Amino acid sequence: MKHTLSMLLLLPTLLVTGCAPRYDVVIVGGTPAGITAAIAASREGRSCVVLERSSHIGGLPVNGLGATDIATRGATTGLFARFVELNRESYTEHYGADSPQVRDCSDGYHFEPKVAQESFARMLAEAGPGRITVRTMRQFDAGNGNVIKRGDRIRAIRIVDRTTGREERYRGRVFIDATYEGDLGAAAGVPFRLGREGRADYDEPCAGKLYRWWKHGPEGEGSTFEGDSTIQAYNYRLCLTDNPQNRRPIPRPATYNREEYLSLVADVLDGRNTDVRFREVTPEQMALNRRRIEAGGRTSIPGDPWGMAKITSMTRLPNAKMDANNQHLALLSTDLPEENYPWPTADWAWRDRFAERLRDYTLGLLWFAQHDEALPESFRKACLEWGLAADEYPDNEAFPRQVYVREGRRLDGIDFFTAHDALPVNKGGRPPLHRTSITASHYALDSHAVRKREPGRIHLDGFFSSPTAVYTVPYGVMVPRRIENLLFPVAVSGSHVGFSTLRMEPCWMALGEAAGEAAALAIESRSNVQAIEIETLQQRLLDHGATLVFMRDMRPGDPDFATVQRLALEGYFPDWEARLDHPLDEQTARLWSSLSGRRIDADSTRTRRDLIRQLSRPAKH
């Protein structure tokens, strides 16, 4: 009777999973992290499926984010470095090593959307045939019932084929949530955070309600540093060009509302901006600036951009294109704060409506800047030099297909990343060193606004950028506490300020690679993702060129790179340089002796390289 009852309880699970395709690793989200997760798992012999809601994989780099967000090149390597290398190779192969395109690609860190798409396709092809299945137009909804579990283990998920409207089910041994929103993790029951913590919670810089001069400037009136439920703004990363042969005019959207953009007129004439230097600008200077512009001139106010750069932050890409992001110096730009608040937990019908609203708002802003006669003619003329790059997104009228979701849910993990994990412990030193590091990374603490313009405020609430140092990211930020076979390399665990530096694509790609390796290791060792051998995971990442601890004087490819990485995680190299070809000094000899339990003497006849090779060998007893 007991056996019969158990079988009856299992029957619903068997019915819904019995005929579903099975893969070793099921990845929801064709973001860069989803792609690197699939490649990493497949190179360990595991079958993978990538389920992407849109018609194209590649996430934001394929949708306009062409200026890579990384503060220290070389800090993050592995598959991210391969992506950068392929970008550069593409421009070299097509245009020649000495071409303007190779110069403008900045060693592969700056790229056109279509080149990013090509590079991801090449990376997937390099993984070999048959190991990775990519299915586009597959929608996962975070609503109830779309994750089938037995206890704390996911057995299968339900997906909708957007082309046919039919439901599909996918079984897997490990599941990876590579969505920007954390949809799969939430549907599986992982707790999550939204909004921003206050300064009192973790004593983080930039936490809570904040009005700050750009960039790294002091706080202004109204800053309370209290937490709330607000979400940082989203936008579209536009690909613009001033090449007449490839320039598509900005269309006037059907929902155009001139009233939304009128504040730009006074901002242009007065030169109003959020640069810290503007606080010294006098009313007399603004009046003079207004007369200068009305006479046909340009702004002379410090920090004030002109033309299209007034409303978009532009970074040069190859082939006369620009990655046009929100302009941090402006009080009105392509971000649309407040209206995106529901996005992280909304259904796809709501998200699609917001995406359309954001598209119309963005096109309306650009059209206003180019055509509204309340603006100075010289400003409009400068803006009219730019249009959409006609050879990008040919199936979407040259407009990006995907909203830039900077932050969705932050899923609850074993480790919790705050700003302090990215800040030096002492001046000029490293941030805290995580022994379970799966990548090094580096970007500023960086958030966009959470509110629209408010009278009398120096900037939009929530905008900040604050320096960090190259840090280590612990494995546990993407590992849930309970669910045994789920990893989430994008919607990682942390505070709003801590997440604000992790949220860059190079870091997410490295975390995706680590998630793929961890998934393969969990399957191989028949263990939960919480119980895998971290040292084995780290070694596999090192074998494929990852960087776990950044050293200024070492790169993957050095014969002793992996050894230094392992020793650095144990504290052997507290400084930024390994100096392997230097002799060992007394202070370092004492440190190494203490850490190794062996007697190590300073010796001017032997280099550090000699000694670490000795340390990497087992001690004789």
Image (tube, rainbow, N blue to C red):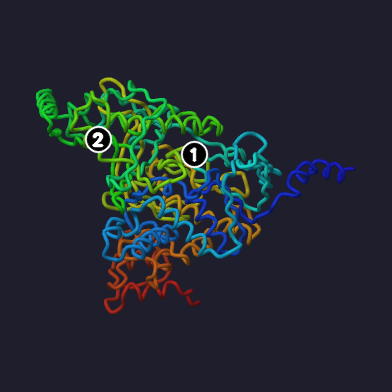
Q: Categorize mark 2 by other alpha carbons within 10 Å: few (<14), some (14-19), many (20+).
A: many
Q: Position of residue 119 (x, y in %)?
A: 44, 58
* Left or right: 300, with 170 as reference point: left
Q: Position of residue 503 (x, y in %)?
A: 42, 44
Q: Is residue 221 visible?
A: yes
Q: Categorize mark 1 by other alpha carbons within 10 Å: few (<14), some (14-19), many (20+).
A: many
Q: Is residue 570 visible?
A: no
Residue 410: give its label: 1
Query: Disc 2 residue type?
Result: Lys
Q: Residue at x 32, y 31 (%)?
A: 367
Question: Residue at label 2?
Answer: 310
Q: Residue at x 49, y 29 (%)?
A: 342
* Left or right: 132, with 297 as reference point: right
* Left or right: 51, with 62 as reference point: right
Q: Residue at x 32, y 70 (%)?
A: 580
Q: Looking at this view, is 73 or 34 the one in front?
A: 34
Q: Position of residue 576 (x, y in %)?
A: 31, 59
Q: Is residue 494 above or below residue 125?
A: above
Q: Is residue 422 above or below residue 513?
A: above
Number of the front mark, 2 or 1: 2
* Left or right: 17, with 183 as reference point: right
